[in-house]
């Protein structure tokens, strides 16, 4: 009974196989910004910190500050162009 009701009440939506896949402009810009010299500088610092922390068996050091600096550099780069690409 309910199955027939919902089948009539709700429209069916079908995806076309020929439609091109949607691309997230923010992800495209992030990938592009990771290649800038500014972001690479912070990526190197993050990698150095990770190597240092992973080489020790007992440490209280974390790489949170380096991670935040890296993410901030990428986000700062992305915000310049992101809103002009959104529809």
Image (cartoon, helix red, strand yellow):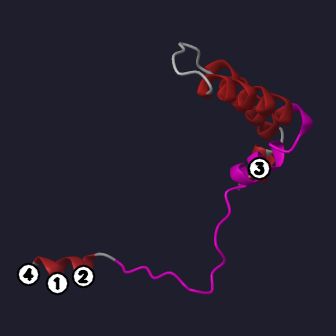
Q: Residue furthest right?
A: 37
> Where does label 1 land, which residue?
4
Quarter of the N terminus within the rendering: bottom left
Q: Is residue 27 magenta?
A: yes
Mark 2 touching mark 1, by CB under 8 A?
yes
CA–CA distance between discs 3 and 1? 47 Å
Lower sequence index among marks 4 and 3: 4
At 73% from the left and 24% from the top, the residue drawn is 69
In this picture, which residue range is highlighted in magenta? 11-38
Q: CA distance from mark 2 to mark 4?
A: 10 Å
Q: Which residue is mark 2?
A: 7
Crowding at label 1, few (<14), some or many (≥20) Cα neighbours within 10 Å? Answer: few
On residue 31, the disc is 3
Dot 1 falls on a residue whose secondary structure is: helix
Label 3 vs 2, first from the N-terminus:
2
What secondary structure characterizes most of the magenta part? loop
Question: As drawn, is 51 to the left or to the right of 57?
Answer: right
Residue 81 is a magenta residue = no
Q: Is residue 61 above or below residue 43?
A: above
The residue closer to the viewer here, 87 or 26, is 26
Q: Most extreme residue toward the top, as rendered?
A: 60
């Amino acid at each position: 009974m309910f199955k027939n009701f919902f089948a009539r009440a709700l429209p069916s939506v079908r995806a076309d196989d020929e439609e091109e896949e949607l691309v997230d402009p923010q992800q495209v810009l992030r990938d592009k910004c990771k290649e800038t010299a500014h972001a690479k500088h912070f990526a190197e610092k993050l990698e150095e910190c990770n190597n240092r922390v992973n080489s020790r068996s007992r440490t209280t050091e974390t790489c949170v500050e380096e991670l935040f600096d890296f993410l901030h550099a990428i986000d700062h780069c992305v915000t310049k162009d992101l809103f002009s690409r959104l529809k």
